[in-house]
Image (cartoon, helix red, strand yellow):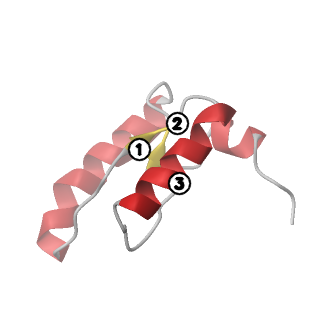
Amino acid sequence: MLYDPSDRSNVLVLKELQESAPALGLAVRPLDVQGPGEFESAFATMTRERDHALFGMSGVLTLEYRKPS
């Protein structure tokens, strides 16, 4: 899960997901991204650890640096 620890809403959602994930048989790996230069490292970690899914938190940081489709 990509999230910005300085964004309070991201922290609250992370807490909720971590509490409910075990009941669904899931594990949440929080990867904090606090600036545009940290996305590449987070994706490299997900690739190296062979994570099966990505949940990206919506917030100021992720919306500011998204690429329009």
Badge 3: residue crowd in 10 Å (few <14, some 14–19, many ≥20):
some
Instruction: Kindly identify the amino acid type of the residue bearing the numbered disc 3.
Output: Phe
Circles 1 and 2, Cβ within 8 Å, touching? The answer is yes
- Element marked by disc 3: helix
Q: Is residue 32 left or right of residue 27?
A: right
Q: Vertical placement of 43 versus 64: above or below?
A: below
Camera-near label (2 vs 3) is: 3
**Residue 41 image point, x, y percent:** 53, 43
Residue 61 placement: quadrant: top right
Circles 3 and 1, Cβ within 8 Å, touching? The answer is no
Q: Nearer the viewer, residue 10 or 33?
A: 33
Q: Is residue 47 left or right of residue 63?
A: left
Question: Which residue was labeled with disc 2?
Answer: 33
- Element marked by disc 2: loop
Question: Which residue was labeled with disc 3?
Answer: 43
Circles 2 and 3, Cβ within 8 Å, touching? The answer is no
Can you say which quadrant of the picture contains the C terminus? Answer: bottom right
> How far apart are the alpha carbons under marks 1 and 2?
6 Å
Q: Earlier in the sequence, mark 2 or mark 3?
A: 2
Badge 1: residue crowd in 10 Å (few <14, some 14–19, many ≥20):
some
Question: Which residue was labeled with disc 1?
Answer: 31
| Residue positioned most to the front | 48
Camera-near label (3 vs 1) is: 3
